[in-house]
Amino acid sequence: MEQNSRQTDVTFLWNGRPVTGRSGDSVAAALWRAGITTLARSRKVHRPLGYSGSYPTGVLARVNGRPNVRIDQVAVEAGLVVEMQNTWPSPRFDLLRLAQALPPKLVYGGFEHGAWMPKSGLAYRLAERAMANLAGVARPADTSLAAAAVAGERLDVDCLVVGGGPAGIAEANRHAERGGTVALVTRGDSLARFASSMGAALDTLDPRVRLFTGMELFGAYRDGALMVGAPHDNRRGAVAFVPRETVLATGRRSIPPMVRGSQLPGVLDAYAALQLAAVHRVMAGQRVAVVGTGAEMDIAKKLAVLGVDVVHRGPVAELSEIMGRRRVTGIRAGTQIRCDAVVHAGPWRADPSLGFQASGEGMFQVQAHPLPQSFSIVGAAARGDERIHAARHVHPDTLVCPCMDVTAGELYCHIDAGETDPEVLKRLTSCGMGTCQGFPCWENMLALLAARIGVEPEMFARPTHRPPRRSITVAQAAGLAALVEPDQ
Amino acid sequence: MNTLPLPKRASVVIIGGGVQGLSVAFNLVERGQKDILVLDAGYWQGGASGRNGTLIRPGFASVPWTELFILTVDEWRSWSKRLGENVMFTQRGYSVVSEAEKSEAMLLEGLKVQQSLGVNSRMLSRREIDDLLPAINKARVRAVQHQPDGGVAPHHAVMKGLLAFCQRNGVDVRYRTKISGLERTGPRVSAVLAGDHRIEADCIVSCAGPNNPDIAAMAAVPLNGFGMRIEAMALEPTRPLIKPAIALIDSLAYFHQTARGEVVGGTEVPERPRMSLKVDVPVMANMAKVYLEMFPQLGEVRILRHWAGQFHASTDYAPLLGEHPDLKDLWFSAGWSYGFAGAPAAGRLLAEAIAKGRIDRRMKPFALDRFEKTGPIVEGGIVLA
């Protein structure tokens, strides 16, 4: 409450209309508080998407002429101009959402395959032009923005800790006490956002640790000898770390439930919901359902303490559908329950990207191997992945990859025709080729595939987790040009 | 996916199910060839066919290259119809941009060759540059050679079309199937070995990309060239900003904006030669620098993903097309550095030669033994170091 008293009102523009948020809010939180839940439209059929904590695609908007800015990471400022993307003719009235009424099969393959397009000549060129406008999602950046390389930094450290949760802090402190140079990189704007939302007692970070907040460590290069991160704020430079040792304290995330409606605005992962409630004092909804793999009881209790009205708590495996057209209006979990938000707390899985990149090798396919000696994993990330509950028949409208708008039905269409190679499914559907580059959607894709053909998801080689998965702008990357010598 | 046991014999075994191998198969089917088997050690689109820049142009600086690529553009134009699948080839133009006096002179030289062979190609006026490339940083542009008939074809659509055609027409295509040896009988190659399994063949065509030297080694014959890797990256999609395909001849960079909005391209930095599918930071940083300098509006766009691809280049970077001079019935489509663009021509020329015994004059300059007989092909118009 003390925090609230210091907050002042800030007015910014959303689709041309003024919205008032509080200083310290992210744009996404301010919009949520104002009751605005649809922040983006999906790529193919313009489904409403919002702040989910799982998929960045729901929070990409145009901010002051810059396309595809993550508005859950931009603080409100007076006069900020924020616009929804991927709409026509205007954000307030998007005619293209009528595409939701198309027969689903018509958009399988989406913008990647021209089954319904003219095959050659001018007719194809015109169709291609139309498609480029539909698929492009965002208008290019305003020409008035001065473009210049953002100078990067190269940093040699004894130890690089990735992740600013309790495990990362403890590990960074331990290394600092031993006298080595330590850097800690966290995606959050502060340390241990989720643990502190849960009210956990925290160690303070040793002042000798160099802290990089608001930074995505997006790539492990040269077997992990080079680790590169970029700040979400694109005015700050990227950093190329050269660590002697790397500690992955990247935690685990809750994987969105694989049921119809899981992409609807109002479905939030536990961390995002806690953060909204504890930091921004914005409730996920008036009536909230919490599902999970065991943690839902604690999370629900904490949410209730923060003022959330929890109307249901139960295992995610019992959840069979999330209902709603523009946002969540209810769930089916044995019985039908009316609610306007669903918070999921499990299954918990670790993002495999950095470990995959540090260890991956192969001539025909890059596959993960045991981590290099210089790597260790601590905290929740070391606890292993929880199994994803997938039925053999998931509703075909279930969205597996919100970034590329890929449904279970589209995947089934290929799986049932005999295509069971994840690399091929990825290329046929573009599943996992969007903003998040495969996490969390490949977790669900592999579980769906395995359940369909009756095998274990672990038997499949994962598609390549490619860096830099939209973490770095062209201007930030250009600032690294003189800092990293080619491997000669 | 075909899970039946491998056959014991095939008329033609094609090693490599990329765009080269499937183009040969497709052209053979069109010429009435039956009993074709395609074997690939990786997955569909897993090799260079799924990792390249997809740029296509007819005009280069030498006669052999330009004649081959005029044919390939003609082929590209008819592929959608002949395959019965939309390969989404679009002739939205290909612009070769020079930033220095020396490269401008080279473009002018190349233009003469192209025009003498009937390629639609011209140098753009400043005004035309403004119209065609409104977003380009004009201060950096010295000259632009523009080929309106050039363009791009998205590899996912091309590979899907080829595979669908092959499967519909009885070609047996097996991915994730690695061969372990080749068998020679007298002066000819006679069989492919996949572990314990032996497949007898009348003719074997190696379209194995970076693994072509391994195939030659299995047959104990020499093959010119070396392995190379190149990196490319895709930016987050935006609405159309760049219309034609672009090659920057001085920056050694090439890119285009795909029909789904991503700017996809690559560049090269000098580094130690190695074969790997892993990427490194210098290419990303240098490519970003090129984008930022040439198209400043891309500065705010984020890089979506970055990957590497491998291929086998000949020492003059021109393809190696034809039967091996030392071993009968072993054919190669190898040594490519513009392999995706050239695949339709290569498939056609090889199929003519294999099925009809006709060696087209446009294929002759690319014979495997040219280095000993006529010397390497000199081509200054390729964007490759």
Image: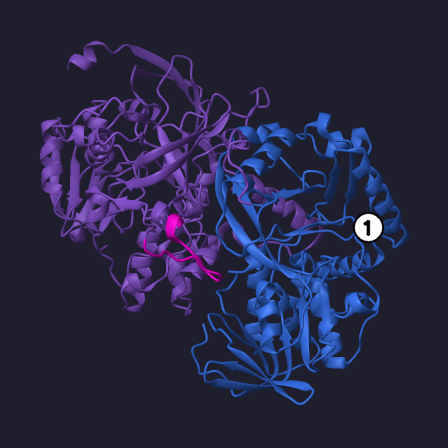
* Viewer-side residue, B176 vs B260: B176
Q: Which chain carries label 1?
A: B
User: Is residue A367 in the magenta section?
Assistant: yes
Q: Where is residue A106 in the image (x, y as percent from the top left)?
A: 48, 55
Which image quadrant for residue A4? top left
Q: Where is residue B182 in the image (x, y as percent from the top left)?
A: 57, 81
Answer with left or right where residue B364 lies relative to residue A477.
right
Residue at image x 46%, y 26%? Answer: A237
Q: Which residue lies furthest to the right in this view?
A: B116
Can you identify the residue that label 1 sits on?
A: B61
Q: Residue at 54% across / 79% down in the picture?
A: B181
Q: Please provide the residue range marked out in magenta.
A: A357-370
Along the line of sight, the residue nearer the viewer: A248 or A1 = A248
- Image chain in blue: B
| Residue A68 in magenta stretch | no
Q: Which chain is purple?
A: A
**Percent of width and height locating residue A288:** 17, 36
